[in-house]
RNA sequence: GGGGGAGUGGCGAAAUGGCAGACGCGCAUGCCUUAGGAGCAUGUGCCUUAACAGGCGUGUGGGUUCGAAUCCCACCUUCCCCA
């Protein structure tokens, strides 16, 4: 059990960071306590299936790694010579290397350590085990550190070849992972290789590299190869050997094919006040009894005192603690542990969708209407905690009949981290209070600025100065939208205005769908400038001008909702701008009759030419060659190649004519 | 150590095989102003040049291509994640 001495509570593996409590940074120690778990491992395989999720690959990879499914073989090494009737269970994904086992290593916490340690080694082993108990798992498994181990003095038998190999204790083996014991194959595992060299153990090649001449290896050979020194399996490819050896082990009863997971069951007990009480009652006669459904939910008592000993007030609150056994009615005690807060965040979206469910925790009909969540926005830091728990909850609730879908969040986007003073902005450690910014510039300005900082999924650096640009732009919008269009009677700029409108909408909508709000806003800024220019030139009609301003406001609405609404009303509209549809764009109106081609000579830009938009390749190249600065660079040269990229550029490749 | 991002002006950034630096900040000059931490206009990658123009330039070194910030290889720096 991971125990934080400061917070006086247990922690899930996911909540231990670098051996320290995720909340307060205190070094976490190991404690043995009875706890409540959720059986998330029962869903491990289903949780691995993320094919239909539109999530960032990175998050999917992190979840896969966290679940950590590996297929391999469990095999027992007999130790009855030293501990009658016992054997050491080991798990390996490389059963093809089993003939190369030259030692077996136990985790310091392994129950057989005590039984197997021989008298002459006892003092040294006990010291070693005590030392390992003071170190964190991160320290023990760090690859930076040299592997250490100590002999127990005992030996075990490899069932495949009947060999007697030494049993050691090593702190790089964790009791909590796999079987808490590993077989040592120095020739084919780099950690074992280094370990064997250090302690003078045999390094025996059993999977030969191609063209192996029988000499000693310089480092472990990890890839596949040919079985050698492997009895009846010699000559097989190690890929086939894996299956053949596993078959033999299973048919001989020495072990079996096994799937293991890194994921462990979710420890949900917390020794805190602030949490959902675990609905369990302890009765001296009936044992552990769940609170009957009609008595749910168990509510926290309200008038409690918090003492500085860090213990949950629930452990001292008699009115909460004492109750009657639901089965026999005799006096009984409530569980005083509460549920991890990740339990609540695993289904809050279901409750949001059905806020008044009556007797049930949620209303399935309303949940079906609204969910699953189409687009979820959250931080990448939730990859293996909240997001995994939430998926598990959804699947469990589905199996209980509460929801009819498999996944809670169809599409996931990670917003990036905001950095201030070289540290990430966080509500706990480095907060950015929006109030003064809102006070000074308004909520719309702050909102737009956050969108303008950079790509949404990359976050950005907060700076106080850049916000002025957004403030100025919104000021220009305010000005331009309210100009009096009655003096406009022109027509020369109509076509240009229409083009600008449709191009802008195309850019704004495309970028918004890709969560590139920064470039969406840049497009609207350019459009604002264009509107101002057209008004000052007075070369459009009043109607076109007004339509163009409406278009600006409609696209501004999602970004600066208050300002857009106010201007929508001030420009003569009734009803809310937020009930309007976004404008559409006509691709045919985004093009123009003439285009500017860039002209390169040998890939270097030399000039530009204005040509008809539908110009043919030959004509485009001919026009390009006439450009003054191009002619200069190709004069007297032999033309090797001419390239025309329609609508974009011409590249003329030349070399000296000599 | 392993896994995954990122590296472009003074700064935030744009461009994902086709005119590098859009848009914005900052800065400079000018206009307006009794005033400016307001507003407006113009300019602003570096070097050479009176100008036309030319050279250099997207972390470093190589490669592919008519053409590379963009693709490939190696390296450097940095951020995030890690049983």
Image (spheres, coloured by chain):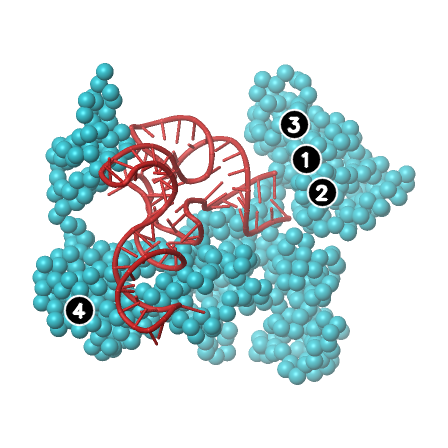
Secondary structure beneath label 1: helix
Place of residue A74 in the rendered image (x, y in percent of width and height, measured from the top left): 66, 40
Secondary structure beneath label 3: loop
Q: Nearer the viewer, residue A553 or A293?
A: A553
Q: Mark 4 lies on which chain?
A: A
Disc 1/disc 2 C-alpha distance (Å) = 10 Å
- In this rendering, would A629 be left or right of A7? left
Asked if the residue at tag 3 contacts the one at tag 4, i.e. Cβ–Cβ closer than 8 Å, the answer is: no
Q: Nearer the viewer, residue A281 or B1?
A: B1
Place of residue A134 in the rendered image (x, y in percent of width and height, measured from the top left): 77, 51
Asked if the residue at tag 3 contacts the one at tag 1, i.e. Cβ–Cβ closer than 8 Å, the answer is: no
- The residue lying at 58 percent from left, 32 percent from top is A243
Report the chain shown in red: B
Give me the disc on residue A191.
1
Other-residue count near label 4 (Cα within 10 Å), few / some / many at <14 / 14–19 / ≥20: some
With respect to residue A533, does A323 lie above or below?
below
Circle 3 residue: A219
Asked if the residue at tag 2 contacts the one at tag 1, i.e. Cβ–Cβ closer than 8 Å, the answer is: yes
The part of the image, by quadrant, that contains residue A11 is bottom right
Report the chain shown in cyan: A
Labels 4, 3: front one: 4
Labels 4, 1: front one: 4
- The residue lying at 70 percent from left, 80 percent from top is A305
Q: Share a chain, discs 4 and 3?
A: yes
Other-residue count near label 1 (Cα within 10 Å), few / some / many at <14 / 14–19 / ≥20: some
């Amino acid at each position: 059990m991971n125990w934080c001495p400061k917070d006086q509570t247990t922690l899930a593996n996911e909540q231990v960071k670098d051996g320290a409590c995720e909340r307060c940074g205190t070094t976490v120690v190991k404690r043995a306590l009875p706890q409540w778990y959720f059986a998330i491992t029962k869903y491990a395989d289903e949780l691995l299936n993320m094919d239909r999720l539109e999530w960032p690959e990175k998050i999917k990879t992190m979840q896969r790694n966290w679940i950590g499914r590996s297929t391999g073989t469990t095999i027992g090494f007999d130790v009855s010579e030293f501990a009658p009737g016992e054997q050491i269970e080991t798990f390996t994904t490389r059963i093809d290397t089993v003939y190369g086992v030259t030692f077996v290593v136990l985790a310091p916490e392994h129950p057989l350590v005590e039984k197997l340690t021989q008298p002459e080694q006892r003092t040294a082993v006990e010291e070693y085990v005590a030392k390992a108990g003071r170190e964190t798992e991160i320290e023990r498994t760090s690859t930076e550190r040299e592997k250490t181990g100590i002999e127990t003095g005992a030996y075990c038998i490899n069932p495949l070849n009947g060999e007697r190999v030494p049993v050691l204790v090593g702190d790089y083996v964790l009791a909590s992972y796999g079987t808490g014991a590993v077989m040592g194959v120095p020739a084919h595992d780099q950690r074992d290789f280094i370990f064997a060299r250090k302690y003078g153990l045999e390094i025996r090649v059993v999977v030969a590299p191609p063209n192996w001449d029988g000499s000693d290896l310089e480092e472990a050979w990890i890839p596949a190869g040919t079985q050698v020194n492997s009895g009846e399996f010699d000559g097989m490819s190690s890929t086939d050997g894996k299956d053949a050896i596993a078959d033999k082990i299973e048919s001989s009863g020495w072990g079996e094919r096994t799937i293991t997971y890194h994921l462990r069951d979710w420890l949900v007990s917390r020794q805190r006040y602030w949490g959902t009480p675990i609905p369990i009652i302890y009765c001296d006669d009936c044992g552990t009894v769940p609170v009957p459904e009609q008595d749910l939910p168990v509510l926290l008592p309200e008038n409690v005192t918090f003492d500085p000993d860090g213990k949950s007030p629930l452990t001292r609150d008699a009115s909460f603690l004492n109750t009657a056994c639901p089965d026999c009615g005799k006096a009984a005690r409530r569980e005083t542990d509460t549920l991890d807060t990740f339990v609540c965040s695993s289904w809050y979206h279901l409750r949001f969708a059905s806020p008044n469910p009556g007797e049930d925790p949620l209303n399935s009909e309303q949940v079906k209407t609204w969910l699953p969540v189409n687009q979820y926005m959250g931080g990448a830091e939730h990859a293996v905690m909240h997001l995994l728990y939430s998926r598990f909850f959804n699947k469990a609730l589905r199996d209980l009949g509460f929801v009819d879908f498999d996944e809670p969040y169809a599409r996931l986007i990670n917003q990036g981290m905001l950095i201030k003073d070289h540290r990430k902005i966080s509500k706990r450690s480095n907060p950015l209070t929006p109030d003064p910014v809102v006070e000074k510039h308004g909520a719309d300005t702050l909102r737009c600025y956050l969108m303008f900082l950079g790509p949404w999924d990359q976050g950005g650096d907060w700076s106080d100065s850049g916000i002025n640009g957004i403030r100025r732009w919104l000021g220009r919008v305010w000005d331009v939208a309210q100009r009096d269009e009655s003096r406009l009677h022109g027509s020369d700029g109509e076509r240009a205005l229409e083009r600008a409108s449709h191009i802008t909408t195309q850019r704004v909508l495309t970028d918004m769908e890709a969560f590139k709000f920064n470039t969406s806003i840049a497009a609207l800024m350019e459009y604002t400038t264009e509107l101002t220019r057209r008004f000052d030139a007075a070369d459009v009609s009043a109607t076109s001008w007004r339509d163009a301003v409406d278009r600006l406001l409609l696209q501004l609405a999602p970004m600066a909702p208050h300002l857009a609404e106010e201007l929508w009303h001030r420009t003569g509209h009734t009803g809310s701008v937020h009930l309007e549809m976004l404008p559409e764009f006509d691709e045919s109106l985004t093009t123009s009759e003439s285009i500017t081609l860039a002209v390169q000579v040998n890939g270097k830009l030399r000039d530009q030419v204005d040509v008809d938009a539908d110009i043919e390749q030959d004509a485009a190249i001919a026009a390009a060659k006439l450009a003054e600065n191009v002619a200069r660079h190709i004069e007297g040269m032999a033309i090797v190649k001419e390239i025309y990229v329609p609508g974009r550029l011409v590249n003329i490749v030349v070399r000296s004519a000599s």
